Amino acid sequence: MIGVPAPHFICDQCVPRAHAVIADPGQRASTPTGPIGQAADAAGTLQCCFCGKSRDRVGAMASAGHTRICGQCLDLCDEILSEVPPLPSR
């Protein structure tokens, strides 16, 4: 789980789902906590909950409830997840 001060987190399974939503504006993804959709905000008032950039300063942004994440932060999540060693099998 990757996050900033509560309540904004994204799990390793939702990162690729959010990428897919950003890649296809009409697509939505289901998660156990709710759907992920693309954040459309022509006025640019929405902000990424992870970096604080407004919607008009990033290429795309995914939204699930009140939590939003931009494509740049999703890319950073990919980097972080690629460096995490796998959990040992039991």
Image (tube, rainbow, N blue to C red):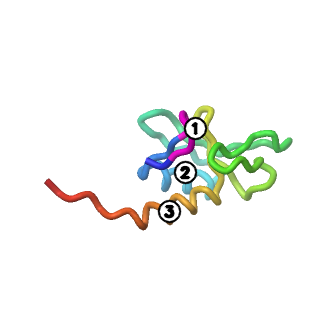
Q: Please give the label number shown on residue 35.
A: none
Q: Residue at x 74, y 50 (%)?
A: 53
Q: Position of residue 42 (x, y in %)?
A: 83, 44
Q: Which residue is mark 2?
A: 18
Mark positioned earlier in the residue sequence (2 or 1): 2
The relative height of residue 71 versus residue 6 in the rendered view (above or below) is: below
Residue at the front extreme, as displayed: 5
x, y (%) of residue 38? 65, 45
Furthest-right residue in this view: 43
**Quarter of the rendering containing residue 37:** top right
Residue 76 rendering spot, x and y as whole percentages: 56, 61
Provide the secondary structure element on which disc 1 rests.
strand
Which of the pair 60/11 is nearer the observer? 11
Q: Earlier in the sequence, mark 2 or mark 3?
A: 2
Front-most of 55 and 5? 5
Which is closer to the viewer, label 1 or label 3?
3
How far is mark 2 from mark 1, CA to CA?
9 Å
- Callout 1: few (<14), some (14-19), or many (20+) C-alpha neighbours within 10 Å? many
Q: Which residues are magenta?
A: 3-8
Residue at image mark 1: 64
| Labelled pair 2, 1 in contact (Cβ < 8 Å) | yes
Q: Amino acid at mark 2?
A: Ala
Q: Are marks 1 and 3 in contact (CB under 8 Å)?
A: no
Say left or right for 49 vs 14: right
* Residue indicated by mark 3: 78
Give the residue type at disc 3: Asp
